[in-house]
Amino acid sequence: MNTEESKKLFEESGNYFPGGVNSPVRAFGSVGGVPVFIKKAEGSRIYDEDGNEYIDYVNSWGPCILGHGYQPVVEAVREACLSGLSYGAPTRRELELGKLITQCIPSMEMMRMVSSGTEAVMSAIRAARGFTGRDKIIKFKGCYHGHSDGLLVKAGSGALTGSAPDSAGVPESYTRHTLLAGYNQEDTVEELFRQYPGEIAAIVVEPVAANMGLVAPKPGFLEFLRDITTRYGALLIFDEVITGFRMALGGAQEYYQVKPDLTTLGKIAGGGMPMGVYGGRRDIMEVVSPLGKVYQAGTLSGNPIATAAGIATIKALMDRTDIYSSLEQKADTLVQTLKEILPGAQVNQAGSLFSVFFAKHPVVDYESALKSDTRMYAKYFHYLLEHGIYTAPSQFEILFLSAAHTQEDIEETKRIMKEAAANL
């Protein structure tokens, strides 16, 4: 596989961007080698600057659920662009998209549009603190909620008492109200509520953990979070930036039948354009300015191009009621193949989301995920890449299918996966 043009571009990019990229995982630091620079995408395929073609299982980390360049979305964006790119003022499209979101996710009675998932989660937590009058929040080790200062914390021996910043440039004081619990470990959550009664504003959680590889909630875990937050007067925030409109039309909360107080969205809600949304119970959202005293603003919030893409995408998903069962069937096929050819590995799945861990033990939380053999994953990744299959360049990311993946794509992927397993 020729990658000379990508190599040249990566080397030159290093003069302008830290590590040559604009988001860390793109640098291939976890798997080694040089990242391929993408030139275009169509359907289930992406094409790099050297002309190599790949079946894509990253799909821009989720939003391209209909496939790359889905024509109704592209046409909606093109038409919107002809009327101007940004107004910094209210539009009809914001209202239309808001109605569609509430129709699909009824728990989002009122919402605010922003420009990214990071901004959505940061703002939802601020609203939760403003509503409850409490400062502390609980997050889970291995769950990523964007790069706002208060959420960049790492796991450690002091997980039940506090957190240390996980990034240089974040003062320790910014994270002193962020408490860490273990995903799928109910006792760690109970202990925090016992230690800080009346001080915890909210639990924020990925209902399906998707940033330490795929780790599904164990049976009853999400119901437990719903119950304990209610008992202690705290709020439950579902970070559905990945799972929203991906696991079901109503997201993970529909899939698992657990209703949070607040929800954050991104990815698909903007049809692949920069978009985030946070919302939930009306009484909570009414604390947000200009109705309440919790301030949040953004010139590009509800951008007319992003809302046009979001409307077209959600309408397509509503019209294609079979899309979720179809995606899950495709995932089932690939997961079953991986289990057969990699008996020493773990393959985790939730709906159409899945990932493979090179680990002999079940991966059920952050600690077990970290014990995976990342060097073996890197070998597996590069074999797939060199043979036309584009997957996550990190052991701790997940794979995404789209409606554009054909049965031929799946069969070709299975064939290459089998070859990869034989060559490891």
Image: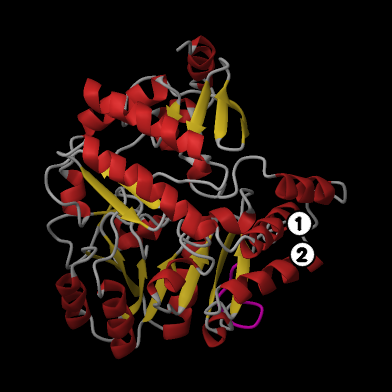
Magenta-colored span:
289-296
Q: Identify residue for label 1.
A: 304
* Residue 149 as seen in the image, left or right of residue 307: left
Q: Quadrant of residue 386?
A: top left
The alpha-carbon separation of the residues under discs 1 and 2 comes to 7 Å
Residue in the picture at 20% in, 38% down = 358
188 part of magenta stretch: no
What amino acid is at disc 2?
Arg
Structural crowding at the residue carrying mark 2, measured as other residues with C-alpha within 10 Å and reported as few (<14), some (14–19) or many (≥20): some
* Residue 409 as seen in the image, left or right of residue 43: left
Structural crowding at the residue carrying mark 1, measured as other residues with C-alpha within 10 Å and reported as few (<14), some (14–19) or many (≥20): many
Q: Is residue 246 visible?
A: no
- In the image, is residue 28 above or below residue 206? above
Q: Identify residue for label 2.
A: 93
Depth check, front residue: 97 or 327: 327
- In the image, is residue 141 above or below residue 199? above
Query: What secondary structure is found at the residue carrying circle 1?
Result: helix
Q: Quadrant of residue 135?
A: bottom left
Question: What secondary structure is the stretch in magenta mostly built from?
Answer: loop
What amino acid is at disc 1?
Pro
